[in-house]
C-alpha cells in the first residue's frame, strides 16, 4: 500500500523583544537573529517580531493573542517580558489565553 506524504505547516510563533533591551538597531538585529535561529532549529514559523515599547501589558498581549493559529510566543530571554510585576502579569495572561511561552536562552 502506498501512502501519501502531505506537507505539514510548521507551528506559528511570534517573537517578542523589549524595546529597552533592544534599543540599538544592531542589538535588535542580533536578538532577531537569535529568534530566527531558535525557530529554524525547532521547525517553527516566526511570523512576526513585535517590539514592546512599554505600552500597557494588556494592549501588547491582546495584539499577540489576535494572531491566527498562534502556537507560542518566543523570547530571547525571560527579561523581554518586562520588569518583575509586568513579567508575572504577562506570563499569567499568556497562560490563561492558552499561549505557550518559549525562551531561546536560559
Image: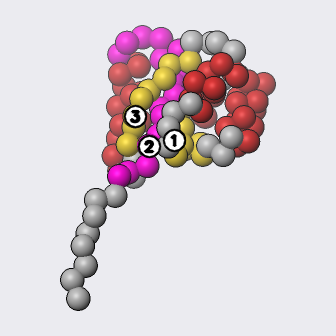
Residue 46 in view here = yes
Left or right: 89, with 69 as reference point: right
Q: Earlier in the sequence, mark 3 or mark 2?
A: 2
- Gap between marks 3 and 2 measured at Cα: 6 Å
In the image, residue 24 lies in the stretch drawn in magenta: yes
For the residue pair 101 and 93, the one nearer the viewer reads as 93
The quadrant of the picture occupied by the C terminus is top right
Q: Earlier in the sequence, mark 2 or mark 1?
A: 2
- Gap between marks 1 and 3 measured at Cα: 9 Å
Q: Please provide percent x and percent y for residue 69.
A: 50, 43
Q: Helix, strand or loop at disc 1?
A: strand
Q: Report the magenta residues as a range.
A: 9-26
Disc number at residue 47? 3
Q: Answer with the quarter of the image where residue 38 lies.
A: top left
Badge 3, how many Cα within 10 Å: few under 14, some, many 20+? few
For the residue pair 53 and 61, the one nearer the viewer reads as 61
Is residue 49 placed above or below 20 in the rendered structure? below
**Mark 2 = which residue?**
12
Q: Answer with the quarter of the image where residue 96 lies.
A: top right
Say if mark 3 contacts mark 2, CB within 8 Å.
Answer: yes
Q: Answer with the quarter of the image where residue 35 lies.
A: top left
Q: Please provide percent x and percent y for residue 30.
A: 36, 25
Q: Helix, strand or loop at disc 2?
A: strand
User: Which residue is drawn at the image coordinates 42% and 29% (left, top)?
Assistant: 48
Say if mark 2 contacts mark 1, CB within 8 Å.
Answer: yes
Disc number at residue 70? 1
Q: Please provide percent x and percent y for residue 94.
A: 67, 38
User: Which residue is drawn at the image coordinates 78% and 25% (left, top)?
Assistant: 85
Amino acid at each position: 500500500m502506498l501512502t501519501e506524504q502531505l506537507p505539514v505547516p510548521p507551528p506559528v510563533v511570534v517573537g517578542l523583544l523589549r524595546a529597552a533591551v533592544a534599543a540599538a538597531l544592531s542589538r535588535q538585529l542580533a536578538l532577531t537573529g537569535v529568534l530566527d535561529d531558535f525557530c529554524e532549529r525547532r521547525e517553527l514559523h516566526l511570523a512576526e517580531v513585535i517590539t514592546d515599547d512599554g505600552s500597557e501589558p494588556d494592549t501588547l498581549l491582546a495584539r499577540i493573542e489576535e494572531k491566527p493559529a498562534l502556537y507560542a510566543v518566543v523570547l530571547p530571554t525571560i527579561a523581554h517580558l518586562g520588569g518583575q510585576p509586568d513579567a508575572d502579569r504577562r506570563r499569567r495572561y499568556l497562560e490563561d489565553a492558552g499561549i505557550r511561552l518559549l525562551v531561546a536562552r536560559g
